[in-house]
Amino acid sequence: MRITRGLHRVWTYVRSAPGTYVWLGILFVTTVAVHHMSPEFEQEFLRQRSTNIHELSNNPVRVLFASAMWMDGGRWLPYAVLYTVFHAQAERWLGTARWLMVCVAAHVLATLISEGALLWAIKNDMAPESAVNTLDIGVSYALAGVVGVLAYRIAAPWRYPYLVIVLAVYGVPLATHRTFTDLGHFTSVLIGLACYPLVRGCGKAWNPKETVAALRG
């Protein structure tokens, strides 16, 4: 009976965030597919689905969609955890439509801004011409955007330590490495924070103090 109840709770949780887990299921299938590719074929296959400058110039809509369905590196389990911790919480709070708007805004705008910065660097001889074909694929921009918008899910003053941690996690790599992907991640967080109008009417912010008090009885 306990196992049955546990499985029921898991299924109920999954059903409460359908977009998150459908997306995660697609990523599982594509990750398995990548593991069956030869290294040479994998790189070319993913490059054709990458939001690099070359592909964005020729097939922008296709690669913006396709790049969010594949992961470079083939590590699915960590993303399953991250999707459950962040995406599922955001979708349950905002609703599927608003959650998807945050994901799309972060993924698309951060990609265009970071690739635009890379193009500027190439034109100013700060990056090699070959960078137009740099592999840029994955779901991390959408994830960073959701991490950003979830700041509004937490009640003040607890929201502010969360913001400090998030900005440090994404800001330090940008300050130290200054790669276009670091810029994309930090931009995604800012886009998530700019999605404040979408959170209005989504219920009371979560107060950790109230949760602890409830657990203590």
Image: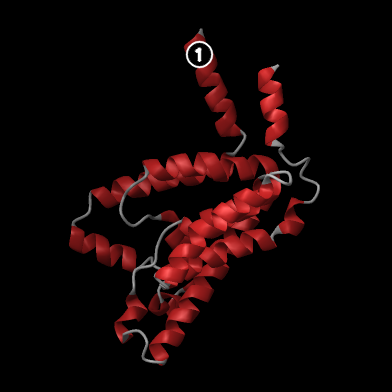
Looking at the rendered structure, the kind of residue marked 1 is Thr
The residue furthest bottom is 124
Colour scheme: secondary structure
Seen from the viewer's position, the closer of residues 153 and 210 is 210
Instruction: Please give the name of the residue rendered at 36% of the width and 80% of the height, measured from the top-left corner.
Output: 132
Query: Residue 19 at x, y = what percent?
Result: 57, 44
Please give left or right for residue 203 compared with residue 190 in the image.
right
Q: Do we see residue 5 in this rendering?
A: yes
Give how far across and how far down residue 202 sits, in percent: 76, 44
Task: Pick the residue in front: 117 or 23.
Answer: 117
Give the side of residue 142 with respect to residue 155, left or right.
Answer: left
For residue 119, which quarter of the picture? Answer: bottom left
Vertical placement of 5 versus 178: above or below? above
Q: Which residue is mark 1?
A: 4
Q: Residue at x 73, y 44 (%)?
A: 155
Residue 9 occupies which quadrant of the picture? top right
> Which residue is most to the right?
201
Query: Where is residue 20 drawn, in percent x and y?
Result: 54, 43
Q: Secondary structure at mark 1?
A: helix
Neighbour class for label 1 at 10 Å: few (<14), some, many (≥20)? few
What residue lies at 68% left-to-right and 29% top-to-bottom?
211
**Left or right: 57, with 5 as reference point:** left
Q: Is residue 81 above or below residue 49?
A: above
